[in-house]
């Protein structure tokens, strides 16, 4: 593959959330409903979700890379393929998907599905959505190896043409916005950014300001099972203490990205519940490899060996995470340990640093490490550990913390720092979309490695699962280890806290909170 870095258009709002909640806010009536409370016969009540990440302010489901917005829009938009609680692919808007030729997949679509504007969903909408989302000017093309085309066979049958054999089709169609279906008329008119118009269980009501958030309500014409919660409000609050105070005061019902040190506080409150979910998200240290000195692979590998990831996970994160042994999360399909994956080894780091031309760090300028605050838990604290680890082998690093909106803007700026801490969550158990984003399309590093590109192409073309696993283990992992363009330090644990009156809340490893399956107990 000869894939250049694609331009990502981000419309991040620079303002910090205006919601004002203090730890001393008066508590509202939060009596806990009986344990055996039954779901209501009709949708009722309102749930307010406070997100650690900002929204983009542009509602095109395909043209952003913001996880929080992807979570929100999953209540309004649906994917062609779903993933069940066991990680298996299940019918979504597509009832079946079949590889009818080496480069063609045929989808049979669900009938009787309508968009929120009342128009029926047909193969024309699937064709328009696939061709739009895979086009290079759209952000979510990051998950595609190349633009795909589609042909309408009939109203409920569509053929997708991939150009080359493409094994991870089901995973792609279940991933983030890659498999979302939107109305073809709105795509062609360029009006997707106005509001959500999907087929999902919740429809758009309003967005007035970041402080008030997005308001969705039940889609009365939904083809599937009717939700039990009537209204869903989703707001950004960038400070973890403020989110927790809002939950405890009754101003919020669910909060995400709870800090590990807050867990005991939540667990001690009988009105609150907590769930801890091992995810498919790794926390990566990206190297800005397009510029010196980060264009030196030996230096990058030295840095990877110098970082005490076990200390970060066990001490800073208090066990909230898993030390990686591969470029795939343990929850990902095709995961296996990589025998050459870098482990904490300061002596090896010093050796590689000398081989890179910087013995003891001599001649190496100060490097800049960028981390977020308020979004990912404990990033400043483990950033300080990284700074000390690198100082121990002779590498001087300056730590910079960024609020969430500025952090999201800087992620794809190759001039922003030398080392960039980030997560990558694409909502699928097939890691190919992650590999395509970070390595095939080089979104954060801005550099492609030919051996990695070849290995990615080979495993994508392997339609036999056993062959694909072998190519991943023997070719892809070693190429990633050798190039070290990104270092996946650990796999995240997503800690979600919520009112005990919110029942049946599912938080799967893909991180998509299934509000439509929950209910409010009385």
Image (cartoon, helix red, strand yellow):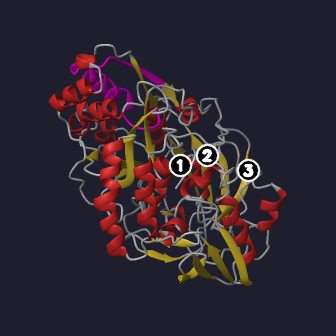
Query: Element type at marker 1?
Result: loop
Q: Which residues are magenta?
A: 374-401
Q: CA distance from mark 1 to mark 3?
A: 35 Å
Query: Element type at marker 3?
Result: strand
Q: Which mark is residue 441?
A: 1
Residue depicted at x 29% and y 46%: 321
Q: CA distance from mark 2 to mark 1?
A: 7 Å
Q: Position of residue 152 (x, y in %)?
A: 73, 80
Q: Is residue 96 left or right of residue 120?
A: left
Instruction: Tell me if residue 484 is in the magenta stretch.
Output: no
Question: Up-down: is 24 above or below 472?
Answer: above
Label 3 neighbour load within 10 Å: few <14, some 14-19, many 20+:
some
Circle 2 sits on which residue? 6
Front: mark 1 or 3 = 1
Q: Position of residue 224 (x, y in %)?
A: 60, 77
Q: Could one spot residue 510 in this view of the protein?
A: no
Q: Which residue lies most toward the right here?
A: 189
Q: Could one spot residue 130 in this view of the protein?
A: yes
Q: CA distance from mark 2 to mark 3?
A: 32 Å
Which residue is more in the foreground, 450 or 166? 450
Front: mark 2 or 3 = 2
Question: Up-down: is 367 above or below 499?
Answer: above
**Nearer-N-terminus badge (2/3):** 2
Residue depicted at x 71% and y 46%: 58
Label 1 neighbour load within 10 Å: few <14, some 14-19, many 20+:
many
**Nearer-N-terminus badge (2/1):** 2
Q: Which mark is residue 206?
A: 3
Q: Position of residue 287 (x, y in %)?
A: 42, 34
């Amino acid at each position: 593959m000869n894939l250049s870095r694609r331009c990502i258009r981000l419309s991040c709002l620079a303002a910090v959330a205006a919601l004002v909640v203090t730890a001393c806010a008066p508590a509202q009536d939060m009596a806990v409903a009986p344990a055996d409370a039954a779901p209501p016969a009709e949708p009722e009540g309102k749930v307010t979700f406070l997100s650690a990440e900002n929204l983009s302010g542009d509602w095109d489901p395909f043209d952003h890379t913001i996880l929080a917005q992807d979570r929100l829009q999953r209540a309004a938009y649906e994917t062609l393929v779903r993933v069940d609680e066991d990680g298996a692919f299940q019918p979504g808007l597509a009832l079946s998907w079949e590889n009818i030729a080496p480069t063609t997949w045929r989808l049979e679509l669900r009938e009787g599905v309508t968009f929120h504007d009342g128009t029926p969903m047909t193969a024309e909408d699937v064709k328009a959505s696939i061709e739009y989302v895979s086009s290079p000017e759209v952000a979510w093309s990051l998950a595609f190896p190349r633009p795909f085309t589609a042909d309408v066979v009939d109203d409920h049958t569509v053929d997708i043409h991939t150009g080359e054999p493409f094994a991870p089709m089901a995973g792609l169609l279940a991933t983030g916005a890659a498999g979302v279906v939107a109305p073809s008329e709105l795509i062609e008119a360029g009006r997707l950014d106005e509001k959500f118009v999907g087929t999902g269980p919740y429809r758009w009501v309003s967005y007035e300001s970041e402080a008030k958030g997005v308001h969705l309500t039940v889609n009365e014409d939904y083809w599937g099972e009717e939700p039990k919660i009537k209204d869903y409000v989703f707001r950004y609050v960038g400070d973890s203490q403020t989110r927790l105070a809002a939950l405890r005061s009754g101003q919020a019902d669910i909060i995400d990205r709870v800090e590990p040190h807050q867990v005991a506080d939540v667990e001690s409150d009988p009105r609150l519940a907590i769930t801890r979910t091992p995810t498919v998200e790794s926390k990566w240290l990206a190297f800005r490899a397009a510029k010196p000195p980060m264009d030196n692979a030996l230096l990058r590998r030295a840095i990877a060996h110098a970082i005490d990831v076990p200390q970060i996970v066990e001490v800073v994160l208090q066990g909230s995470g898993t030390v990686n042994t591969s470029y795939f999360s343990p929850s990902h399909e095709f995961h296996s340990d990589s025998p050459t994956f870098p482990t904490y080894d300061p002596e090896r780091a010093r050796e590689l640093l000398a081989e890179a031309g910087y013995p003891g760090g001599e001649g190496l300028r100060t490097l800049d490490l960028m981390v977020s605050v308020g979004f990912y838990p404990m990033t400043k604290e483990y950033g300080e550990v990284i700074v000390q680890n690198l100082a121990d082998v002779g590498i001087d690093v300056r730590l910079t913390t960024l609020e969430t909106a500025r952090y999201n803007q800087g992620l794809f700026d190759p001039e922003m720092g030398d080392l960039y801490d980030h997560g990558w969550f694409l909502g699928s158990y097939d890691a190919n979309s992650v590999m395509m984003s970070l390595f095939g399309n080089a979104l954060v590093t801005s550099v492609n490695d030919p051996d990695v590109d070849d290995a990615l192409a080979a495993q994508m073309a392997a339609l036999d699962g056993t062959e694909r696993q072998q190519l991943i283990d023997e070719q892809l992992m070693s190429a990633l280890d050798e190039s070290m363009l990104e270092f996946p330090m650990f796999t995240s644990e997503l800690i979600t806290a919520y009112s005990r009156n919110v029942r049946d809340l599912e938080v799967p490893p893909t991180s998509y909170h299934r509000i439509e399956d929950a209910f409010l107990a009385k």
